[in-house]
Image: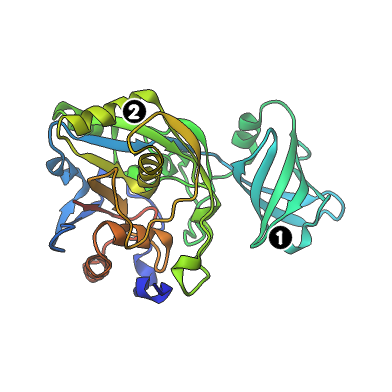
Amino acid sequence: MNIEEFDYHLPEALIAQTPLKNRDTSRLLHLNKVTGKVEDLHFKDIIHFLNKGDTLVLNDTKVMPARLFGIKEDTHAKVEMLMLTQLENDDWEVLLKPAKRIKLGQTLVFGDGKIKATCIEERSQGGRIMRLNYEGILQERLDELGEMPLPPYIKERLDEKDRYQTVYAKESGSAAAPTAGLHFTESLLSDIQEKGVKIAFVTLHVGLGTFRPVSVENIDDHDMHSEYYQMTEETARILRDTRLSGGRVISVGTTSTRTLETIYRDHNDFVASSGWTDIFIYPGFEFKAIDGLITNFHLPKSTLVMLVSAFSSKQYILNAYQHAVNHQYRFFSFGDAMIII
């Protein structure tokens, strides 16, 4: 399958640069996954698609303020480091700018030495493995020195850090927000539960895969990056009970979807587990874990467009995206949402 099959034209003006004042006032496009029919709604209407006995699955990862600005220790040249994934102890996979100038053994300094990072491995596309040395507790140093790692297509600075976090963010470790969840408010989640819909959480820490474009013509040749996931026994039990009672599993976001489908693929059921997933979902994939998907609008030719195309159909998704463009929907991280069900 060729990468060009997942392209679409998006006017730059439709890329949302700032979040809406109220999270749940964003627009919602409903796509019927079987017929391809679309309808224009608002996000609060999501509750009408959820039935008593269903379970809504949310990714509770928390974005770290992991974008650091510092200098090279030897030359004092300016450098930017985006921390992506913790590997072992204080070793981190990162993206650097300018990466070409950072070689094995060189050290970067942030906040007058409050954090130092030494390169212990060079990787492709600006990636490096850095060994950190810092004063005190790393999370406190990041809160002091770091910025939220907003995607490169967002040019505006974010005044409120919590607007790039879901209201239920809990498990720190992500380099990007699970953006489909940004639309939910505590009040809306409460209303959903009052309807008899269960809420369950999984964790997937978003890493390098979110920032890495597909650079091959044949998508079968694309190498997906691994990301850490976790499901608790409580969530596994809720999901098993949901299936036994005839309810549906509705996934919020592509990250929750990848977690659920990884676990079901590996265990043929919902079980408590954790590990690293590089699952690549594109048309032809057989979904076994989810019955519905809530998601944002994704970049052209991205693995995320491929995932949603697999859940419905490529043509239905491209038609829905064209409808969204024609009707001036807001796109990407701070944009509007879609429910496919």
Q: 156 or 327, which is in the foreground?
A: 327
- Check the image and name the residue furthest to the right: 74
Say whether residue 24 is left or right of residue 3: left
Residue 157 in percent (x, y) is at 50, 52
Residue 272 to residue 10: above or below? above
Q: What element carries label 2?
A: helix
Quarter of the picture holding the N terminus: bottom left
Colour treatment of the image: rainbow
Residue 264 to residue 339: above or below? above
Q: In which quarter of the image is residue 283?
A: bottom left
Residue position marked by numbered label 1 in the rendering = 99
Residue 187 to residue 16: above or below? above
Where residue 166 is drawn, which disc sits there? none
Residue 307 in percent (x, y) is at 35, 57
> CB atoms at circles 2 and 1 under 8 Å apart?
no
Where residue 235 is drawn, which disc sits there? 2
Q: 48 or 318, which is in the foreground?
A: 318
Say whether residue 280 is left or right of residue 251: right
